[in-house]
Image (cartoon, coloured by chain):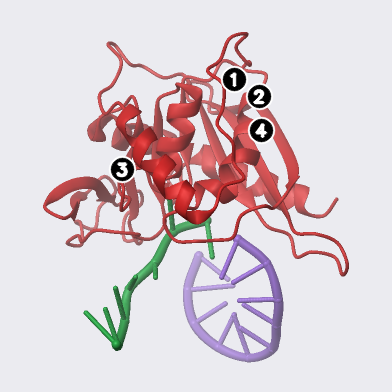
Chain colours: A red, B green, C purple
Amino acid sequence: MRAEPDRAPVHRWDLSPREAIRLQRELAARVEASSPRGFAPRIVAGVDAAFPRPRPGSARQVVAAAVAWDLEAGAVVGMRTVRRPLTFPYVPGLLSFREAPAVLEALTGLDAPVDAVIADGHGLAHPRRFGLACHIGVLTGLPAAGCAKSVLVGRFDPPGLERGARTPLVHRGETVGAALRTRTRVSPVFVSVGHRLDLDAAVRLVLASGGGLRLPEPTRRADRACAAARRE
DNA sequence: GCGACAG
DNA sequence: ATCTTGTCGC
């Protein structure tokens, strides 16, 4: 994604957990849960982060990667990795404050026109309806979906065993995502809306990006890129 | 008060 | 997420 000349200014990241929660409540109101008219993504970016064990004496860092995947060509058309000092602890529900700063730099540094983003975490399937995917979506303005490997909040019944089978992920009486079988007989992933998408579109995006493996191809590539960037 | 808890 | 030994399957 090419950095826009006049993007909305980003907020600060050096917040206390308490301030972070307050910010989430504010930004949650900006999430749009409907898809753009005629939404037909061609290039989807997968983003991921890793945390190399700190070398004795040095500070912890976060390695983030963004990979642009062309759905039509089935090929990587852009990639970017960044390393930044780690400034926030892992707190369930506040993952974006740990990963998003680096992820956003990798994403905005991508030299390709991104149509949508898939983050490895939740979107609306979050205690305050503002998971990592929402944060990335709202700050970039891009349609975004969350694709997590395990649940943070909500309950679900096991979906059918074939690829594409899905059941609702429900939290406090509302459907916040879907348990989706991306591969026959393999444990489901949890898809939720990040921004500018409805749940069906998010599910379709994940299925369209998953070449038969459990995780979407863009996400796998981003994970692989992080692994490669870890030791450098 | 006791569990649960994305990555 | 990261660490970490052995084990199972293609």
Verify CB contact (< 8 Å) between mark 3 and mark 2: no
Tell me how far mark 3 sits from mark 2, CA to CA: 25 Å
Residue A121 makes an appearance in the image: no
- Asked if both marks, 1 and 2, belong to the same chain, the answer given is yes
Q: Which residue is mark 1?
A: A1
Per the image, label 1 sits on a secondary structure element best described as: loop
Q: Chain ID for label 2?
A: A
Residue C3 placement (x, y as % from top left): 70, 76
In this picture, residue A70 sits left or right of residue A23: right
Labels 1 and 3: the sequence-earlier one: 1
Kind of residue sitting beneath label 4: Ala
Kind of residue sitting beneath label 3: Leu
Q: In front here: A69 or A195?
A: A195
Q: Which residue is mark 4?
A: A106
Q: Chain ID for label 3?
A: A
Kind of residue sitting beneath label 2: Leu
Per the image, label 2 sits on a secondary structure element best described as: loop
Residue A152 placement (x, y as % from top left): 35, 59
Which numbered tag is attached to residue A124?
Answer: 3
Other residues around mark 4 within 10 Å, as few (<14) / some (14–19) / many (≥20): many
**Above or below A22: residue A40:** above
Residue A53 makes an appearance in the image: yes
In this picture, residue A227 sits left or right of residue A14: right
Tell me how far mark 1 sits from mark 3, CA to CA: 23 Å
Verify CB contact (< 8 Å) between mark 4 and mark 1: no
Q: Quadrant of the N terminus of chain A?
A: top right
Tell me how far mark 4 sits from mark 2, CA to CA: 6 Å
Verify CB contact (< 8 Å) between mark 1 and mark 2: yes
Q: Which residue is mark 2?
A: A110
